[in-house]
Image (cartoon, rainbow, N blue to C red):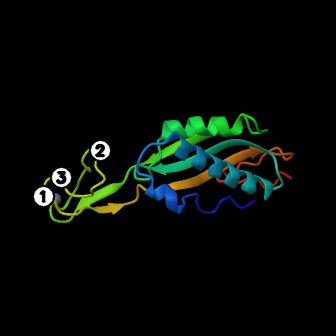
Amino acid sequence: MTPFPRSPISVRWAWAEKARYTDPVHEMGIALEVYRTCRETVESHGGGRLERVRLAVGELSAVEPELLVYAWEAVVVETPDAEAKLEVVWHRANQHCSACDEAKERSEGSWLRLCPDCGMPLQVDGGDELDILDLSFESDQPENEIGSRPASPNER
Ligand SMILES: [Zn+2]
């Protein structure tokens, strides 16, 4: 069985990038979208009960991990996937000032990506991830781990 997904599935969408404030409704919308995407993935692999989802969340993605986990629990509680766990894998942005030739931290609470020392624009790499890295689910087949390890060819 080929590990799935072969590459992370992005669940980012346009308004999520614009929302630069913390809003529980925002996390709820993302949790719903992540859950919907996971269900589609499970259904496309014969169906089953979702066990665990690992989601990469970048620090620039405007998502609060604790709120997202809370929203996730609210989304799955009324479903057959009530036991499914959401694991947030936090990704920091790499920010580099070419003038100072050093990695720099963005000033706390600021969305301006300027070097705190010399004021030049920082080159930002990553940190806007909102990707399902992998998920596992329980199906009629004994082993159906997705993405984490390949299933033995002797199973099924
Ligand atoms: Zn600088």
Give the spatial CA distance, label 1 vs label 2.
18 Å
Residue at the spot 83% in from the left edge and 55% down from the top edge:
46
Crowding around mark 2 (Cα neighbors within 10 Å: few <14, some 14 to 19, many 20+) is few
Q: Which residue is mark 3?
A: 116
Q: Is residue 148 visible?
A: no
Residue at the spot 53% in from the left edge and 43% down from the top edge:
88
Q: Which residue is mark 2?
A: 109
Q: Which residue is mark 1?
A: 118
Q: Is residue 44 visible?
A: yes
The image quadrant of residue 1 is bottom right
The tag earlier along the polypeptide, 1 or 2, is 2
Residue 82 image point, x, y percent: 73, 35
Q: Is residue 136 above or below residue 44?
A: above
Crowding around mark 3 (Cα neighbors within 10 Å: few <14, some 14 to 19, many 20+) is some
Give the spatial CA distance, label 3 vs label 1.
6 Å
Mark 3 Cβ and ligand 1 under 8 Å apart: yes
The image quadrant of residue 78 is top right
Residue 44 image point, x, y percent: 79, 59
Mark 1 Cβ and ligand 1 under 8 Å apart: yes
| SS category of the residue bearing label 1 | loop
Q: Is residue 118 above or below residue 27?
A: below
Residue at the spot 36% in from the left edge and 54% down from the top edge:
93
| SS category of the residue bearing label 3 | loop
Q: Amino acid at mark 2?
A: Gly
Q: Amino acid at mark 1?
A: Cys
In the rendered image, the residue lying farthest to the left is 118
Residue 98 image point, x, y percent: 20, 65
The tag earlier along the polypeptide, 2 or 3, is 2
